[in-house]
C-alpha cells in the first residue's frame, strides 16, 4: 500500500471523506494543510502536481474568487495561474497528493483506483466538488 502526502483544506468535508477512503484501502495518509504550505518558496513544486492537466483544471471551482467572477481560470496562462494560486491558496484544486515522486491534483476516484488502488466499496458520491454550494463554510473555513 502507498504512503500518501495529502494536501488538504482542514475541515473540508470531501477531503475528510477522501482520506477515509484512502485509509480504508490500506494506504497511509500524511495530511498537510494546503492553505499554510509555503508554496511561494518553490512555486515549481506546486506546478508539478498538475502534470498534463489544462490550466483551467488546476482550480478549485468552489473558491470565492472564482464563484464571484474575480478570477477566470480559462483566461489564465501557466505563470498567471501559479501567481494567483500563490496569492490565494483557496484557488488550488484539492487535494494535492504525492506518492513517491508522482504527484496528482484532484480526486477522481477512477484515476485514483488505477494509480494506487481504492477500497472495493468505493463511495459513489462526488468527492471532488464541495457539497456546500450555497454556504461559505467549505470555501472559507
Image: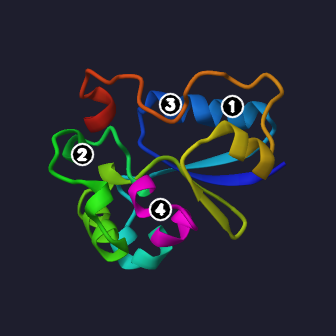
Distance, label 4 to label 1, CA atoms, is: 27 Å
Q: Earlier in the sequence, mark 1 or mark 2?
A: 1
Q: Which mark is residue 54?
A: 4
Which secondary structure, mark 3? helix
Q: Are marks 4 and 1 in contact (CB under 8 Å)?
A: no
User: Quarter of the image holding residue 62?
Assistant: top left
Q: Earlier in the sequence, mark 3 or mark 4?
A: 3
Distance, label 3 to label 1, CA atoms, is: 10 Å
- x then y, percent, for residue 94: 47, 47
Question: Left or right of 110: which side holds 6?
Answer: left
Which contiguous range is marked in magenta?
A: 47-57
Which secondary structure, mark 2? helix
Nearest the viewer among 125 and 36 is 125
Which secondary structure, mark 4? loop
Q: Which residue is mark 2?
A: 66
Q: Which mark is residue 14?
A: 3
Q: Which residue is mark 1?
A: 21
User: Quarter of the image holding residue 136?
Assistant: top left
Q: In the rendered image, is residue 116 in sight?
A: no
Distance, label 3 to label 4, CA atoms, is: 23 Å
- x then y, percent, for residue 49: 54, 64
Residue at image position (37%, 77%) is 41
Which secondary structure, mark 1? helix
Amino acid at each position: 500500500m502507498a504512503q500518501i502526502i495529502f494536501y488538504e483544506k482542514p475541515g473540508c468535508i470531501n477531503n475528510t471523506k477522501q482520506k477515509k477512503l484512502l485509509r480504508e484501502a490500506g494506504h497511509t495518509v500524511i495530511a498537510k494543510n494546503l492553505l499554510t504550505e509555503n508554496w511561494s518558496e518553490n512555486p515549481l513544486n506546486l506546478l508539478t502536481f498538475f502534470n498534463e492537466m489544462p490550466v483551467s483544471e488546476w482550480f478549485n471551482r468552489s473558491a470565492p474568487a472564482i464563484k464571484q467572477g474575480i478570477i477566470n481560470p480559462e483566461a489564465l496562462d501557466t505563470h498567471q495561474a501559479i501567481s494567483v494560486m500563490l496569492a490565494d491558496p483557496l484557488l488550488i484544486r484539492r487535494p494535492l497528493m504525492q506518492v513517491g515522486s508522482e504527484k496528482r491534483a484532484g480526486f477522481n476516484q477512477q484515476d485514483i483506483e488505477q494509480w494506487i488502488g481504492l477500497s472495493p466499496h468505493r463511495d459513489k458520491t462526488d468527492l471532488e466538488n464541495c457539497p456546500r454550494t450555497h454556504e461559505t463554510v467549505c470555501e472559507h473555513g
